[in-house]
Amino acid sequence: MFDTPDAGEEISVKLLYSKSKVYVHPSTHARDYIPGYISIVEKVWVLAMFSQHNGILKGRGDAQASREYLVAWTPEAEILSKDMDAYVKVDSNPEEADDAASMIMLSSIIDLPDKRSLYAISTNVSSIRSLLVHPPSFTKWYGSIVINFQDGSSSAPLWFHDDESRSTVLQKNTQGGKFSDSSEKSGGRGSQLRWGGDEFMFRLSQLIRIEQSKDDVHLYLVGENIPKKSDDKDPKAQHAPESSSEKPQRITHQYDTSVFDSAQMDPWVATWKEFKWSALEKLSRITTFTRNTTAAAADQVVPRLPPQLQAALNTDAVRATTQEYDSARIYLAKWAADLAARSEQDTPLERRYRHVGIWGHGDAWEEETALGVFEVLNSENDFSIPTHTRTKPISKEEWKSFFDEAGKLSVGEPYVRKRIFCGGLDPEIRKEGWLFLNNVFPWDSTAAEREKLANKYRASYAEIRSRWLDNPEVRESATFMDQKHRIDKDVHRTDRTIAFYAKEDMPNPDPIMHVGTNKNLEKLKELLCTYNMLDNDLGYVQGMSDLLSPLYMVIEDDLVFEAFVGFMNRTKSNFYMDQSGMRRHLFTMDALLQFMDPKLFKHLQRTDSDNLFFCFRWFLVWFKRELSWDDTLTMWEVLWSDYLTEHFTFFVALSILDQHRDAMIDYLQSFDEILKYINDLSLSINLQETLQRAEILYYQFRQRVQAVDNKREKLQQSLSSKSKEAGDAEDRKNAEKELSKLPVVSELLRRLYSDDDASADKQFTEKL
């Protein structure tokens, strides 16, 4: 009779630690970097013991359990889809690893128990001889760790890109290298400056003894490779087999985990990384405290002062000094936003936009709803969303290639719209392109047909113009004269810094106007007066001259009138006297912001800024006051393309807010501050950055809507399938609770990717 372990072996696996965005750099080119996860895995074997008697195996009723710990680095591309959720969840919630990845079979690691391929690693901690740790420095922005094995081989350097790690973005316990948890849960480490490497060292030092080498400050010896001291206890004693009568528990080693403190980054490097979020915040608190303290003291002291002194204190100089405290917060917000933008620009192009929207602050949205971030994206990196679609403008040669010998489009209208959306138009072909985009010419017309239409539109314009130009009765009417006077004043204030409109080389035909003019300004007046005759109900409204001015400079033909009519058909509701159109825009933007970024929305509510007045000018003149002249022309082409949606203006607005959300939330505390900050963005907005973000946000919006709809359908099916019996009561209660937390996707939101506005119009009217 003898004892033998046989087929009674059971294996359980736990993912104890996971860190995303740990890269291997095969070359100095960022395009070659390989992203992956570094992880620590616990494997537990429960071995059933058998007795053999006369050739027959019988269970003895006892069992033994043993465990081992694996350290692994796995490229993202090699992680199986069934394992990815575990990696992402443990990375996002490291303190809840027991709940997130309990008893999960990680085939990506376990199927290869001792894998050391060209870059991938999966090895027992006992196989590790030492670790070479280089924290971030001024010469190396990212820190790295090299694993040296007992057989003399070494891993490639593993670079911790902390600014991309999910635990940094979602967990909010680490930001820019600062580990902020000072609770007992963190091992009593206190609030110290951290990076991903020393966090890994801490986790590993809980499982095996680690000591810093006396010969090299960057070298850390592991396990049995550490020289023994007389008072050392035998670490193997802690790994004795356990009886199956007790549930196997993870062993907590009594090793000194403070060793990883020496692996921290240089304080000056950490300070530089943290500067924009800690130093600026503290400065802001100082100015706020000083201002509040001064104001409180003044409220008590000033009324007791003599009248002459009170009058002296109530001067512009004193008020300006007080206002400087408010402007300091705005200045700090701009500074922080500028630093963030520069950091973004320094990020390699292929990873630059991976912190947009849900990728950057999806945790806020997840906290507000019953929908987890993992139900929105299939994995941490959702490569179904393109992040680099901006291209060069369509050249004259490329534009010509789109048409056949008859001048008819041969490549398909959707393709041309996509190219315009992605790159815009070269100035040489802008005139022709704008006539298509504003519905002057049909996309399927030939060159001959377009020439006939052009003559027809010119004749139509001449006829409408004659209704006022050749009719003294109309021109001398009080109504027309009032409209004409308002048009004249606005035109002389429109785009006068542009050379096309700058000159005053001819006398003004209107004796009331005591300024010179030029032929282009007079043409703008003529066109606007003619539109006033075409649409008497609307007439002329301030802001129309801003929309017409670029059109005329580009087209410079009477055909511009038809293009302007097409443009006004898109934007006419913005100019309604009852402002119903603009209220609808702001109401839609309100719903979109609440759906996409509830944290920023709540901040705007707290600062009485949720009326979104700062968006009014954006929507009225299509961001013309926010962008340079050339950028405005490109922006309009992109919006006219209708490639993704007719309502892309909302995602452009969301993109601008997304770029500045952190600065607004951290530093701006009142409506006046937010309004000034937003208005000061004028002429400083990066067009290509804004358009790329807007496109990403649009795709994320579509995903979120789909995720909400799918979740609601599943919960409703669950409720309909569960009975009212006691056993199902708790499940029904939980399902109803989750259902109530789901955000409502209104028709106003759904219309943002639909051409049917009828139901949205009805809903908006009902709310008004």
Image (cartoon, grey):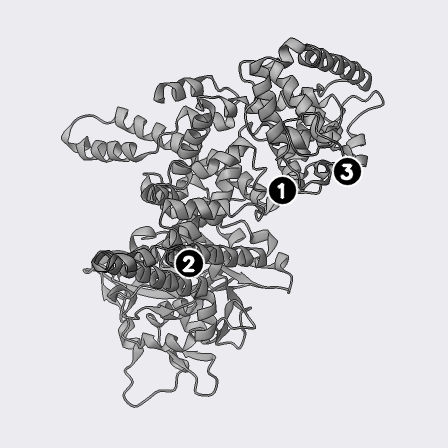
Find residue 389 and name its label.
1
Query: Which residue in the structure is indicated by mark 2?
Result: 328
> Which residue is most to the left?
726
- Give the number of the mark in front: 2 or 3: 2
Is residue 127 visible from the viewing direction of this image?
yes
Q: Measured along the vertical axis of the image, is residue 536 above or below residue 138?
A: above
Say if mark 1 contacts mark 3, CB within 8 Å.
no
Q: Based on the displayed image, in which of its 4 quarters is residue 434 positioned? A: top right
What's under tag 1, amino acid-wise? Thr
Instruction: Say few, some or many: other residues with alpha carbon within 10 Å of mark 1 (under 14 / 14 to 19 / 20 or more).
Output: few
Determine the secondary structure under disc 1: loop
> On the rendered image, what quadrant is the N terminus found in?
bottom left
How much space separates mark 1 and mark 3, taking CA atoms? 17 Å
Q: Based on the displayed image, in which of its 4 quarters is residue 178 positioned? A: bottom left
Mark with earlier residue (1, 2): 2
> Which residue is most to the right?
405
Mark with earlier residue (2, 3): 2
Residue at 33 percent of width and 58 percent of height:
313
Q: Position of residue 523 (x, y in %)?
A: 71, 26
What's under tag 3, amino acid-wise? Ser
What's under tag 2, amino acid-wise? Ala
How much space separates mark 1 and mark 2, taking CA atoms? 38 Å
Query: Which residue in the structure is indicated by mark 3?
Result: 395
